[in-house]
Amino acid sequence: MAELLLNLSSTAAFFLTVLSLTSSFATIESKTFSRDLSPSSMGLNKPEKLSHLHFYFHDIVAGKNATAIRVAKAPTTTVSLPFGAVVVMDDALTVSPDIDSKLVGRAQGIYVTSSQSEASLLMAYNFAFMEGMYSGSSLTVMGRNPVFSDVREMPVIGGSGVFRFARGYAEARTSTYDYNTGNAVVEYNVYILHPDSPVQISNALSPNYRKKMSQFLCIFILYFLILKV
């Protein structure tokens, strides 16, 4: 009976130790929110390639099928001085100026009339692609767009999917503009530097967590060796 109680006590003590260690591992891992990685672990040791994307952007602000909607304005915003207006867009991207041509993605984001002296927009939006090898990937553009300039250049500041770690710029040229409705078709040429192949995100445990788990396994093995004696 005494031997049984001793074994039960030892087992209980062991499992309490395991529970305590497991809790401490979880705490340690939750506090470790940053770590250093080798660029090669993210595929950044591979050659970069330069991609050129060409498509047409359809900004429809009027009519029953509008894809760009004004959602806010300043108290001083007027027709003659649209400064301060905020527009949310979900504009189609197609392979030609015809809106019924092949859809390759959507331009989703916002633009704001940000100048009091000219027709200029601050644009912050994503090109969300839906076609071919780029389907599910996106590029993020943020920059100044003086809409009546012949060519406008805006930075591409990042991307997702096959465009992770992307950088480059987008050139916009107005193809057509309807002065009555404000609807526009804009030609885009986008030049992107990005890794030559999709990057896989590593899900490896942090070194600190692996060290603590090794210590736990050593304690576990040592306990059973003691029981065998």
Image: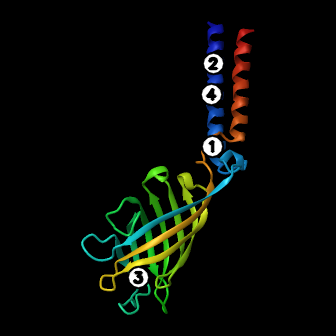
Looking at marks 2 and 1 on the same chain, the residue that comes earlier in the sequence is marked by 2
- x and y percentages locating residue 115 in the rendered image: 49, 87
* Quarter location, residue 175: bottom left
Front of the two marks 3 and 2: 3
Q: Is residue 194 above or below residue 30?
A: below
* Quarter location, residue 16: top right
Q: Could you tell me how far apart the alpha carbons at marks 1 and 4 are, in whole angstroms?
A: 33 Å
Residue shown at 65% from the left, 39% from the top: 205
Looking at marks 3 and 1 on the same chain, the residue that comes earlier in the sequence is marked by 3
The quadrant of the picture occupied by the N terminus is top right
Q: Could you tell me how far apart the alpha carbons at marks 2 and 1 are, in whole angstroms?
A: 38 Å
Q: Could you tell me how far apart the alpha carbons at marks 3 and 1 are, in whole angstroms?
A: 42 Å
Q: Which residue is mark 4?
A: 16
Left/right placement of residue 228 relative to residue 80 reads right
The amino acid pointed to by label 1 is Ser
Looking at marks 1 and 4 on the same chain, the residue that comes earlier in the sequence is marked by 4
Q: Could you tell me how far apart the alpha carbons at marks 3 and 4 are, in whole angstroms?
A: 62 Å
Q: Which residue is mark 3?
A: 85
The residue most toward the left is 64
- x and y percentages locating residue 172 in the rendered image: 49, 74
The amino acid pointed to by label 3 is Ala
Q: Is residue 21 above or below residue 14?
A: below
SS for dot 4:
helix
Can residue 37 be seen by looking at this rendering?
no
Front of the two marks 3 and 4: 3
- x and y percentages locating residue 215 in the rendered image: 73, 30
Q: Which residue is mark 2?
A: 11
SS for dot 2:
helix
Residue shown at 48% from the left, 70% from the top: 188
Tell me if mark 1 has few (under 14), some (14-19) or many (20+) residues whose alpha carbon lies within 10 angstroms of its own: few
